[in-house]
Image (cartoon, grey):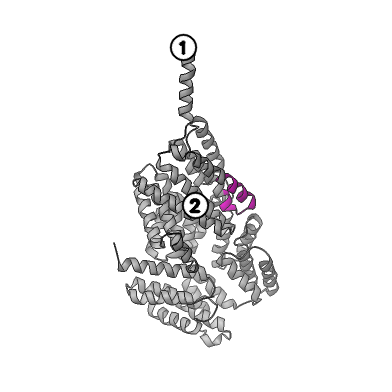
Amino acid sequence: MRFLIIIFSFILLSKSSSAYYEFDANLKSAYSSIISFDFEKSKTLLLKEKTEKPGNDLVILYSNYVDFLKAFISEEEKYFDEFKKKSNENLKLLDKREENITSPFHHYAKAEILIQQALVKVKFREYVSAATDIRKAYRLIEKNKLAYPEFLLNNKLSGFLTAVIGAVPREYHWLVEIAGMEGSVPDGTTELKTLFKTLEKSEFSCYREELLFYLSELYITFNSNEADLLECMIYMRPYAAGSALMRYSTSAILMKMGRNDEAYDFLKDPAAYNTGFPFDFMYYKLALCKLRKLDFSASKDFEEFINRFKGQNFIKSSYQKLAWIESLQNNPQGYYTYMTKCRSLGTAFIDEDKDAQSEAAAIDIGNKLLLRARLLFDGGYYDKAQLELAGMPVDSFPKYKDQLEVTYRLARIYQKTGQEEKAIDLYQKTIDNGASATFYFAANSALLLGMIYEDKNDLDKSESFYKKCLSMERHQYQNSIDQKAQAGLDRIKILRNPE
């Protein structure tokens, strides 16, 4: 009898510790805690799951989430090194189960970890390795969609990858083609938006918050359509009170829409900063909000961001903004002091930092009137921005750059205040006068004309301006402007050939 009990116990133990995937209530709570940056709570819940259900391999995926977010948000080397080590170990663990698992979660989990690896590697400029991870993830999800076509989370990664592949800069398109991957930003966005609505009454409804973050980033980066931005913001508002991620995304969309005062109300709330894991970028966004109101107490928040943040991105941009504040307060020495720091500190890998580095290298304090108009425009204070430029003809600005900027800035103001024909005329003048310059004004004018004619459903004109935008090279914000123009061409293709 004792021998039979031992055998029976061994069988039960073997069964309980063999690998499987179960997205139970405890893991749903752990996932929600992770997305809220409450990593201590998620750690407790994951430990509970591992103890009570030692064979549930979803613990591996959500543990990886924690390490991923720490590295991605902080941009600190120590978290990056820790994440790389652990994520590789996690993939090896899942690889060992390959022959014995018949769950749609298996390849999904591996693909998710690979995507997380790729995103962090891009932050730390390991581009070749990141591209390899994306290709592996793409293959796994394609395979999983064939094996488990009804598994909803396939579409989360598929939609994300489709958008990411579509956003690859054109000089690297040949690599995407060689890898056999296809994608476009509009297709990926549509897939994610459809999934968001589908998940509402599914067992994966907790993933809707993460999907909203992806959608908000895609809309902000590639699509300025007011209706899409507004719809996304409406969906996010119920989450914003209890989620740092949604508070950030909601404020970012509000800033994109020129609703700066509303964004400021979100960002000034102390609750925005009471996160389990430091989300220092909120200080940068708050500072931007203040600066766009010409509230020069923004300098305190830029300094707070610089002092807290241990990563490299947005450091140059912060010093540039601090220099602007000094200039606008008639302190040229303060401007040059901060621009000296801008030249030597931080990195220049994102567009904002590249722009800051370029200004710092030029050692040109710039036109304060145009700077005030630019900041007020970015905040959505269009009437105030126009007043700054009132009575100032183009030829009253002696510098070529300033002449281009005032034409471009007035076009932007006219577009936002419903004076579209005036805007079109000035955008065209900006292109005519600045197409060969290294400033971004002409390229962005072509992009915006493409969007105007796309909204009018004049697809031929829209296409010609998107292509005109892409034909301009070696200008500021090259990658981001090109990506938006390519996304516009992809939308036109869909409009001409709807399925």
State the residue position of label 2: 115
Q: Which mark is residue 1?
A: 1
Q: Earlier in the sequence, mark 1 or mark 2?
A: 1
What's the amino acid at mark 2?
A: Ile
Disc 2, SS = helix
Residue at the image point whose x is 65% and y is 72% from the top: 360
Q: Which mark is residue 189?
A: none
Q: Is residue 104 left or right of residue 2?
A: left
The span shown in magenta is: 70-87
Q: Give me the C-alpha separation between circle 1 and circle 2.
A: 52 Å
In the rendered view, would you say 189 is above or below 275?
A: below
Q: Is residue 32 left or right of residue 227?
A: right
Q: How many marks?
A: 2
- Within the magenta stretch, is there residue 449? no
Residue in the foreground of this view, choosing between 427 and 493:
493
Quarter residue 458 falls in: bottom left
Residue at the image point whose x is 52% and y is 34% from the top: 50
Select label 1 or label 2 by which is in front.
Answer: 1
Q: Is residue 282 visible?
A: no
Look at the image and tell me in which quarter the C terminus lies: bottom left
In the rendered view, would you say 149 is above or below 191?
A: above
What's the amino acid at mark 1?
A: Met
